Amino acid sequence: MKNDKEKKRQKLINKLILLNVYKIEDKQLYEMTLAKLDYEYRKYKSQNHPHGEFGSIQWV
């Protein structure tokens, strides 16, 4: 189980690096917990989503 968590953690680190995120709050990504990495990735992903704060495109 620890191996699965470590794999998920590494995937999140890789995804953040692809988004040019190397540090969060003056901490290197490898210093962060899985939960913090997951939170930061979701936050970053939602902030940079093409629809931004508007949500889904809806036709009127």
Image: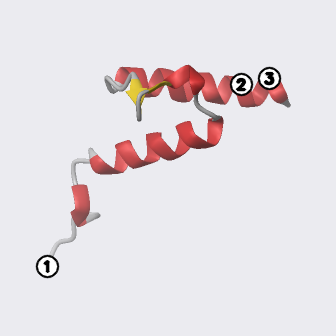
Q: Which of marks 1 and 3 is in front?
A: 3
Residue 31 location, x and y as percent? 58, 24
From the image, tell me which residue sits under label 3.
Answer: 3
At 14% from the left and 79% from the top, the residue drawn is 60
Residue 52 location, x and y as percent? 23, 55
At 40% from the left and 21% from the top, the residue drawn is 17
The reply to whether dot 2 and dot 3 touch (C-beta < 8 Å) is: yes
- What number is the disc on residue 30? none
**Residues at marks 2 and 3, CA–CA distance in whole angstroms:** 5 Å
Residue 5 location, x and y as percent? 73, 31
The quarter in which the N terminus is drawn is top right
- What number is the disc on residue 6? 2
At 46% from the left and 42% from the top, the residue drawn is 40
Which amino acid, mark 3?
Asn
Which amino acid, mark 2?
Glu
From the image, tell me which residue sits under label 1.
Answer: 60
